[in-house]
Amino acid sequence: MTRFTVVWTDQALRHLTNIWMGAANPAAVTAAAHTIDQELARDAPTKGVVWKGAFRMLACPPLSAMFTVVEPDRQVHVITVRLDDQSLSDPQGNGQAAPPESQA
């Protein structure tokens, strides 16, 4: 097992904060964010599904996270996080994740 340091970008933290503040069940959002941290801290390159080469997507309902792995530094960068109902999954159901929409 290889351990990784999980680093959330400012954008991902803003998205997580907005999701948590608007959530009907903030405890579920907190638990999912914790699960993302735990999952990505162990063997990160094997987690989630590949999305456009350098990115990966990991679903931890009710959240999904887009992340990159920097293996030489043993770091994972969480780029963004979204509610699953905001369509991170492929609408055609082929197991590939769609990109998150930009939130300015």
Image (cartoon, rainbow, N blue to C red):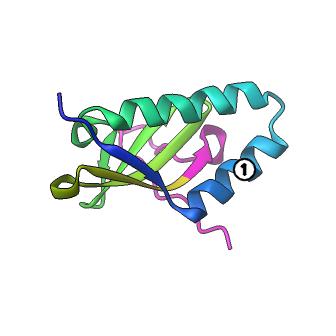
Crowd class of label 1 (few under 14; some 14 to 19; many from 20; radius 10 Å): some
Spot occupied by residue 10 in the image (x, y as percentages of width and height):
58, 64
Vertical side of 11 occupied by 83: above or below: above
Vertical side of 38 occupied by 98: above or below: below
Spot occupied by residue 83 in the image (x, y as percentages of width and height):
64, 42
Vertical side of 103 occupied by 56: above or below: above
| 97 in magenta | yes
Residue 88 vs residue 15: left or right? left
Residue 77 vs residue 8: left or right? left
- Please name whichever residue, 95 or 60, is drawn nearer the observer in this view of the structure: 60
> Which residue occupies 76% across, 52% down?
18
Residue 94 vs residue 92: left or right? left
| 87 in magenta | yes
The image shows a total of numbered marks equal to: 1
Question: Dominant secondary structure of the magenta stretch?
Answer: loop
Amino acid type of the residue tagged 1 in the rendering: Thr
Residue denoted by label 1: 17
> Which residue occupies 36% across, 39% down?
94
Spot occupied by residue 88 in the image (x, y as percentages of width and height):
52, 47
Residue 73 falls in image quadrant: bottom left
- Please name whichever residue, 42 or 83, is drawn nearer the observer in this view of the structure: 42
Spot occupied by residue 87 in the image (x, y as percentages of width and height):
58, 47
For label 1, the SS is helix
Magenta stretch, residue numbers? 81-104
Q: Quadrant of the C terminus?
A: bottom right
Vertical side of 58 occupied by 72: above or below: below
> Which residue occupies 17% across, 27% down?
1
